Image (tube, helix red, strand yellow):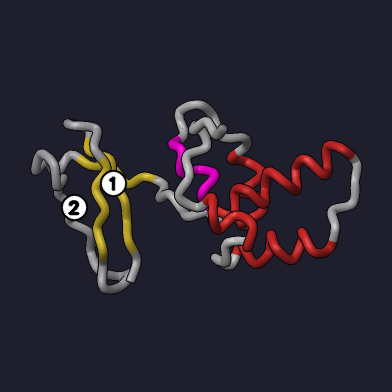
Amino acid sequence: MPIYEFICHDCREKTSILLRSISEPVSATCRFCGSTNLSRTVSSFAYHKSLQTVWEESGEPSAHLSDDYYKDPRNIGRWAEKKFKEMGEEMPSQLKEEIQAAREGVMPGPLKDLQNASPTASYS
C-alpha cells in the first residue's frame, strides 16, 4: 500500500494519501484547506541511527539540561569513558563491566546512595 505525499499550492501544507494499490487513481484533496490544487512531492524517509552515533552527536550536557542528566547511569558511563580516552589511559575492566551494567539499567553499587542526590547540592 503506497503512501503518496502532495504539496498544496494554496496553503503550502503537505498532505499524505494512502492508496490500496499502486494502480488506484489518485484524487487528492488538501486536508488543511480542502483545495485540489496539489502536486505530488518526493516523500521523506526514516533514517535510524545507531546508539553509538546518537552518543557521539549528542555531545556534552549543557547548562539547559536538568539535574536528572547525571542520574541516568548511561550518561555517567559516557563521561567516564570520555575522560579515560582524553587521558590516553586504558579503562579498568571492572569499570567497563559496571558501565555496561549501567547501560542495561543497573545502577553501580557506589552510586546507588547518590541516585536521588542533586549534582548542584553542596556537601559538607
Q: Which residue is mark 1?
A: 6
Q: Which residues are magenta?
A: 66-72
The disc labelled 2 sits on which kind of residue? Ala
Q: Position of residue 55 (x, y in %)?
A: 63, 47
Disc assigned to residue 28? 2
- Amino acid marked by disc 1: Phe
Q: Position of residue 93 (x, y in %)?
A: 83, 63
Magenta segment, principal secondary structure?
helix
- Compare marks 1 and 2 and give the one earlier in the sequence: 1
In this picture, residue 44 sits left or right of residue 55? left
Residue 38 drawn at (x, y percent) = 22, 42
Is residue 46 shown left or right of residue 77? left
For the point 10% across and 39% down, the residue is 33
Give the percent coordinates (x, y) of residue 11: 18, 32
The quadrant of the picture occupied by the C terminus is top right
Picture residue at 72% right of the left edge, 46% below the top: 80
Q: Are marks 1 and 2 in contact (CB under 8 Å)?
A: yes
